[in-house]
Image (cartoon, rainbow, N blue to C red):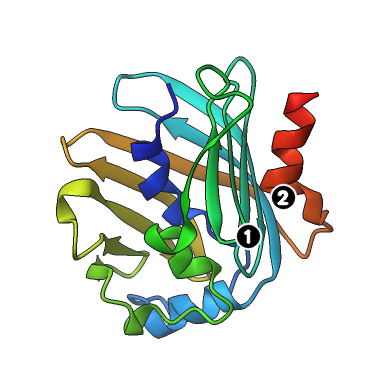
Amino acid sequence: MITRRTFSMSLAACAAMTAMPVSAQTVSLDQLSAYFNGFTTAQARFLQLNDDGTRSSGTLYIRRPGRARFEYDPPEEALVMAGGGQVAIFDGRSNKVRPEQYPLRRTPLNLILERNVDLAARNMVVGQFGDDETTTIVAQDPKAPENGRIEMVFSNAPVRLAEWTIIDGGGARTRVILDQFQTGVQLSSRLFNIVLEQQSRER
Protein backbone atom coordinates (compact mmCIF):
# COMPACT_ATOMS: atom_id res chain seq x y z
CA MET A 1 0.00 0.00 0.00
CA ILE A 2 1.23 3.50 -0.81
CA THR A 3 1.73 5.51 2.39
CA ARG A 4 2.65 9.04 3.35
CA ARG A 5 5.78 7.82 5.09
CA THR A 6 7.04 6.27 1.87
CA PHE A 7 6.35 9.34 -0.25
CA SER A 8 7.56 11.95 2.22
CA MET A 9 11.05 10.58 1.66
CA SER A 10 10.89 9.01 -1.79
CA LEU A 11 9.72 12.14 -3.51
CA ALA A 12 13.03 13.66 -2.63
CA ALA A 13 14.60 11.64 -5.35
CA CYS A 14 12.45 12.39 -8.35
CA ALA A 15 15.25 13.82 -10.38
CA ALA A 16 15.58 15.27 -13.79
CA MET A 17 16.79 13.20 -16.67
CA THR A 18 19.66 15.19 -18.12
CA ALA A 19 23.30 14.16 -18.52
CA MET A 20 26.37 16.26 -17.86
CA PRO A 21 29.85 14.92 -18.81
CA VAL A 22 32.48 14.99 -16.06
CA SER A 23 35.66 13.08 -15.37
CA ALA A 24 35.31 9.66 -13.75
CA GLN A 25 35.55 10.65 -10.08
CA THR A 26 33.22 11.30 -7.17
CA VAL A 27 30.87 14.12 -8.11
CA SER A 28 30.66 17.19 -5.87
CA LEU A 29 27.46 18.67 -4.49
CA ASP A 30 28.00 21.69 -6.73
CA GLN A 31 28.10 19.43 -9.79
CA LEU A 32 24.95 17.62 -8.67
CA SER A 33 23.22 20.96 -8.15
CA ALA A 34 24.18 21.98 -11.69
CA TYR A 35 22.74 18.68 -12.93
CA PHE A 36 19.36 19.42 -11.36
CA ASN A 37 19.43 23.04 -12.54
CA GLY A 38 20.11 21.88 -16.10
CA PHE A 39 16.52 21.00 -16.91
CA THR A 40 12.99 22.36 -16.65
CA THR A 41 10.87 19.35 -17.62
CA ALA A 42 11.52 15.62 -17.47
CA GLN A 43 9.77 12.29 -17.78
CA ALA A 44 10.90 8.77 -16.83
CA ARG A 45 9.71 5.28 -16.07
CA PHE A 46 10.37 3.91 -12.60
CA LEU A 47 10.39 0.50 -10.90
CA GLN A 48 9.75 0.43 -7.15
CA LEU A 49 10.97 -2.53 -5.07
CA ASN A 50 9.32 -2.64 -1.67
CA ASP A 51 10.70 -4.05 1.57
CA ASP A 52 8.05 -6.80 1.66
CA GLY A 53 9.15 -8.15 -1.71
CA THR A 54 6.36 -6.58 -3.75
CA ARG A 55 7.04 -4.30 -6.68
CA SER A 56 5.23 -1.61 -8.66
CA SER A 57 5.99 0.59 -11.61
CA GLY A 58 4.87 3.86 -13.10
CA THR A 59 5.76 7.12 -14.79
CA LEU A 60 7.36 10.18 -13.23
CA TYR A 61 6.85 13.72 -14.55
CA ILE A 62 8.75 16.82 -13.39
CA ARG A 63 8.27 20.47 -14.20
CA ARG A 64 10.59 22.76 -12.30
CA PRO A 65 10.26 24.72 -10.20
CA GLY A 66 7.98 23.09 -7.68
CA ARG A 67 6.04 20.46 -9.62
CA ALA A 68 6.17 16.67 -9.90
CA ARG A 69 3.78 13.78 -10.52
CA PHE A 70 4.09 10.03 -9.84
CA GLU A 71 1.54 7.93 -11.76
CA TYR A 72 1.50 4.26 -10.75
CA ASP A 73 0.59 1.54 -13.22
CA PRO A 74 -2.49 -0.70 -12.67
CA PRO A 75 -3.41 -2.51 -10.54
CA GLU A 76 -1.93 0.12 -8.20
CA GLU A 77 -4.28 3.12 -7.99
CA ALA A 78 -1.91 5.56 -6.33
CA LEU A 79 -1.14 9.04 -7.58
CA VAL A 80 1.24 11.52 -5.96
CA MET A 81 1.40 15.16 -7.00
CA ALA A 82 3.51 18.17 -6.04
CA GLY A 83 2.24 21.59 -7.03
CA GLY A 84 1.19 24.89 -5.56
CA GLY A 85 3.54 24.41 -2.63
CA GLN A 86 1.77 21.18 -1.56
CA VAL A 87 2.26 17.44 -1.89
CA ALA A 88 -0.95 15.43 -2.35
CA ILE A 89 -1.32 11.64 -2.10
CA PHE A 90 -4.32 9.93 -3.68
CA ASP A 91 -3.95 6.31 -2.55
CA GLY A 92 -6.87 4.92 -4.58
CA ARG A 93 -8.42 3.30 -1.51
CA SER A 94 -9.09 5.34 1.60
CA ASN A 95 -8.62 8.75 -0.05
CA LYS A 96 -9.24 8.27 -3.74
CA VAL A 97 -11.05 11.64 -4.06
CA ARG A 98 -9.70 13.79 -1.23
CA PRO A 99 -5.93 13.44 -0.95
CA GLU A 100 -3.75 13.65 2.09
CA GLN A 101 -1.74 16.87 1.78
CA TYR A 102 1.27 18.46 3.44
CA PRO A 103 3.66 21.32 2.60
CA LEU A 104 6.26 20.68 -0.09
CA ARG A 105 8.84 22.64 1.91
CA ARG A 106 8.71 19.96 4.63
CA THR A 107 9.83 17.20 2.26
CA PRO A 108 13.25 16.47 0.75
CA LEU A 109 11.58 16.85 -2.66
CA ASN A 110 11.85 20.58 -2.14
CA LEU A 111 15.64 20.23 -2.37
CA ILE A 112 15.57 19.52 -6.11
CA LEU A 113 12.40 21.31 -7.16
CA GLU A 114 13.59 24.76 -6.09
CA ARG A 115 14.21 27.29 -8.82
CA ASN A 116 17.92 27.30 -8.00
CA VAL A 117 19.12 24.05 -6.42
CA ASP A 118 22.12 24.39 -4.08
CA LEU A 119 22.69 21.09 -2.28
CA ALA A 120 25.88 22.33 -0.61
CA ALA A 121 23.92 25.05 1.17
CA ARG A 122 21.34 22.63 2.60
CA ASN A 123 21.87 20.87 5.92
CA MET A 124 19.63 17.97 4.81
CA VAL A 125 22.57 16.38 2.97
CA VAL A 126 24.29 14.48 5.77
CA GLY A 127 26.60 12.18 3.83
CA GLN A 128 28.40 11.71 0.52
CA PHE A 129 30.56 8.85 -0.74
CA GLY A 130 31.40 7.01 -3.93
CA ASP A 131 34.06 5.76 -6.32
CA ASP A 132 35.10 6.30 -9.95
CA GLU A 133 31.73 5.06 -11.23
CA THR A 134 29.06 6.26 -8.80
CA THR A 135 28.35 8.95 -6.24
CA THR A 136 25.86 8.52 -3.39
CA ILE A 137 24.43 11.28 -1.23
CA VAL A 138 22.42 10.75 1.95
CA ALA A 139 19.70 13.18 2.98
CA GLN A 140 17.45 13.43 6.01
CA ASP A 141 15.63 16.05 8.01
CA PRO A 142 18.17 17.10 10.68
CA LYS A 143 15.30 18.14 12.94
CA ALA A 144 13.58 14.74 12.65
CA PRO A 145 16.14 12.01 11.87
CA GLU A 146 13.72 9.43 13.27
CA ASN A 147 11.67 9.85 10.09
CA GLY A 148 14.35 8.01 8.10
CA ARG A 149 16.69 8.92 5.28
CA ILE A 150 17.09 8.71 1.52
CA GLU A 151 20.18 7.59 -0.39
CA MET A 152 20.44 8.83 -3.99
CA VAL A 153 22.86 7.07 -6.36
CA PHE A 154 24.26 8.90 -9.40
CA SER A 155 26.41 7.66 -12.24
CA ASN A 156 29.52 9.83 -12.55
CA ALA A 157 30.24 9.99 -16.26
CA PRO A 158 27.92 11.36 -17.39
CA VAL A 159 26.18 12.58 -14.24
CA ARG A 160 22.76 10.98 -14.03
CA LEU A 161 20.46 9.90 -11.21
CA ALA A 162 20.25 6.11 -11.46
CA GLU A 163 18.22 5.12 -8.40
CA TRP A 164 17.37 5.88 -4.81
CA THR A 165 16.63 3.92 -1.64
CA ILE A 166 14.41 5.11 1.18
CA ILE A 167 15.11 3.79 4.67
CA ASP A 168 12.26 4.62 7.02
CA GLY A 169 12.43 5.06 10.77
CA GLY A 170 11.86 1.34 11.30
CA GLY A 171 14.61 0.27 8.91
CA ALA A 172 12.35 -0.81 6.02
CA ARG A 173 13.91 -0.15 2.60
CA THR A 174 12.18 0.97 -0.60
CA ARG A 175 14.29 1.04 -3.77
CA VAL A 176 13.34 2.98 -6.92
CA ILE A 177 15.16 2.44 -10.24
CA LEU A 178 14.80 4.97 -13.07
CA ASP A 179 14.72 4.24 -16.80
CA GLN A 180 13.86 5.81 -20.17
CA PHE A 181 14.93 9.33 -19.25
CA GLN A 182 13.61 12.18 -21.36
CA THR A 183 14.13 15.90 -20.88
CA GLY A 184 12.65 18.95 -22.55
CA VAL A 185 9.29 17.21 -22.92
CA GLN A 186 6.02 19.11 -23.30
CA LEU A 187 4.03 18.75 -20.09
CA SER A 188 0.65 20.33 -19.42
CA SER A 189 0.37 22.37 -16.22
CA ARG A 190 -2.80 20.38 -15.51
CA LEU A 191 -0.67 17.35 -14.64
CA PHE A 192 0.46 19.17 -11.50
CA ASN A 193 -2.78 20.91 -10.48
CA ILE A 194 -4.00 19.26 -7.28
CA VAL A 195 -7.30 21.17 -7.18
CA LEU A 196 -8.23 20.19 -10.74
CA GLU A 197 -7.31 16.56 -10.06
CA GLN A 198 -9.54 16.48 -7.02
CA GLN A 199 -12.42 18.13 -8.88
CA SER A 200 -12.17 15.60 -11.70
CA ARG A 201 -12.43 12.76 -9.18
CA GLU A 202 -15.51 14.26 -7.52
CA ARG A 203 -17.56 14.19 -10.72
> Residue 6 appears at what percent x and percent y?
37, 38
Quarter of the image with the N terminus in it: top left
Q: Are marks 2 and 1 in contact (CB under 8 Å)?
A: yes
Secondary structure type for disc 1 = loop
Q: Which residue is denoted by mark 1 in the rendering?
A: 84
Q: Which residue is more in the foreground, 198 or 73?
A: 198
Q: Is residue 45 above or below residue 2?
A: below
Residue at image coords 39%, 37%? 4
Secondary structure type for disc 2 = loop
Q: Kindly tell me whether residue 174 is visible in this rendering.
A: yes
On screen, residue 195 versus residue 152, left or right, reads right
Quarter of the image with the C terminus in it: top right
Residue at image coords 60%, 23%? 96
- Going by the numbered disc 1, the residue's amino acid type is Gly
In terms of image quadrants, where is residue 35?
Answer: bottom right
Q: Is residue 85 above or below residue 132?
A: above
Residue at image coords 51%, 34%? 47
Q: Which residue is denoted by mark 2 in the rendering?
A: 193
